Amino acid sequence: MGNDPTIVGSDSQSEEKYERPKGLKGIYYHPVTQVIMLGFTCFLCPGMYNALTGLGGGGQINATTNSNSNSALYATFAVSAFFSGTVNNKIGPKRTLLLGTLGYALYVGSYLAINIHPGVGDFVIASGAVLGITAGLLWTAQGSMMLSYATEAQKGVFISIFWSIYNLGAVVGSAVSFGQNFHLTDNSVGNGTYIGFLVLTMLGVAMSMLMADPLAVVRTDGTRAVTLRHPSWKSEFRALWTTVAADPMILLLFPMFFSSNFFYPWQFNDYNSALFNIRARALNNLMGWLAQIIGSIAIGQILDQKRLRRRVRAFAGWFILFALVFIVYPWAYSYQRTYTRQSIPADAQKMDIYDPEYPAHVWLMIFYGLFDALWQTTEMWLIGAMSNDANKLAVFSGFFHAMQAAGVAGVWRMDAIGMPYMRILLSTWGMVTGGLVVAFPMIYFRVEDHTTTEDETLVINNPMTKDKVNINVP
């Protein structure tokens, strides 16, 4: 066994209750406070990454380096996220979160470097690869903490609280970029934008250090989110297989995970960067991320609606997503038919916010933001519906982000090598539709009105006795 303590989630149905601290200490250790702090950590790190990516091409004229960097990022992210649940359960989510924030400052700094020295494209790509490793750690710790701090009745609200604050980072970053570039009609941003993003990501690193130890967090129903244990690295790696073997329905969510960021390259590079100048791109970005906040709050309320059984809420979320797919994608297809990669050179005079056709086009970005928020919130809620255990949720979150990263790594590479815009759009449409279809049986057969004790318990082989034992480990 290892010497470093780490954690395992307690069963929310347990009769053992703990008294929550009072006064300022009680406020600090309150689960909602910790989720808010978690949201601001991601506000300042991945939120700035989103603001940068949302500008299309990372704010550069030529989007190829950005696409290659993102391809490298998500390739390493896929590997890192798959094993990051193991790291999280070994060293604890707070340390995992801190390690996860570090790559974002490096990544943003690389764009400042290429803006000053255009020949350092390889540094941007390498920074993307490093960020992929650290981002896997950050998002796994985030998923474990956010879902395990909530009671069953609060998971949709906790997800929407986090998602709103997190996306507020992209909103602020986009607003800063829009303000700095409002008087520009060029196709790239200035150094000041990158410097502002870099300062904010460094604050995010500091914010992660201020988070409470998860061992001290007591849910609002009096149960502990996590309890102490001492795992070995070997047992944690075995837990990856044990989790799937004990709960194979998670596999039906993998296509949905795979397609959950698949639409970003078309949305940001092949639409926002291809058609609009930097001022319009910044405003599009701002409106899209604002829509994400609205969408996450709305779907969170639906998914936690107490008047409806949890199974009914799960099906409602699925049907809303399916309807949105066939609103957003025919709309995007109608615009994509009017241009190609070859018809718009990099130095073209692109659409501005004062052009008469602009208002209709910005509405598509708004609906993409709504769709993104509803998709991400619903799939995280479905993960939370499968367990309340912090360790199991950490492994599930790792699976989620590994599959998510694997999908988007491929499509960023497709964009980098110049695949036709229409082919990328149609493949994205097919992926999100297929992901929903495959997820439907999981909702039908696996989502129950309440999480049972069996959902928190896995059966593994005891190497000392050769017998099978039940333990609260994923």
Image: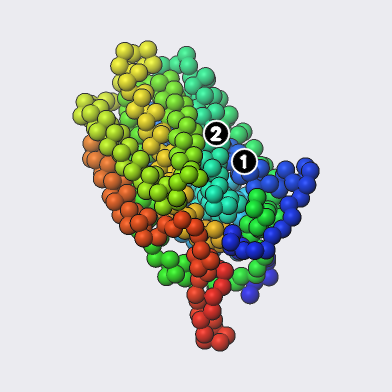
Look at mark 2 in the image and give the residue it sits on. Answer: 169
Disc 1 from disc 2: Cα separation:
13 Å
**Crowdedness near tag 1: few (<14), some (14–19) or many (≥20) residues, C-alpha within 10 Å:** some
Label 2 crowd (10 A; few <14 / some 14-19 / many >=20): many
Q: Looking at the image, is 382 positioned above or below residue 36? A: below
Residue 377 position in % (x across, y down): 46, 44
Give the structural element (helix, strand or loop) at label 1.
Answer: helix
Left or right of 20 in this view: 201: left
**Looking at the rendered structure, which numbered label has been put on residue 36?**
1
Q: Residue at the spot x=51%, y=81% of the render?
A: 468
Front-lying residue, 14 or 418: 14
Q: Position of residue 142 (x, y in %)?
A: 56, 49
Kindly identify the amino acid type of the residue bearing the numbered disc 1.
Ile
Dot placed on the residue nearer the N-terminal end, 1 or 2: 1
> Is residue 43 at all visible to an observer of this figure?
yes
Q: Is residue 298 left or right of residue 95?
A: left
Q: Residue 448 or 117: which is nearer the viewer?
A: 448
| Quarter occupied by residue 400 | bottom left
Q: Tag count in the figure?
A: 2
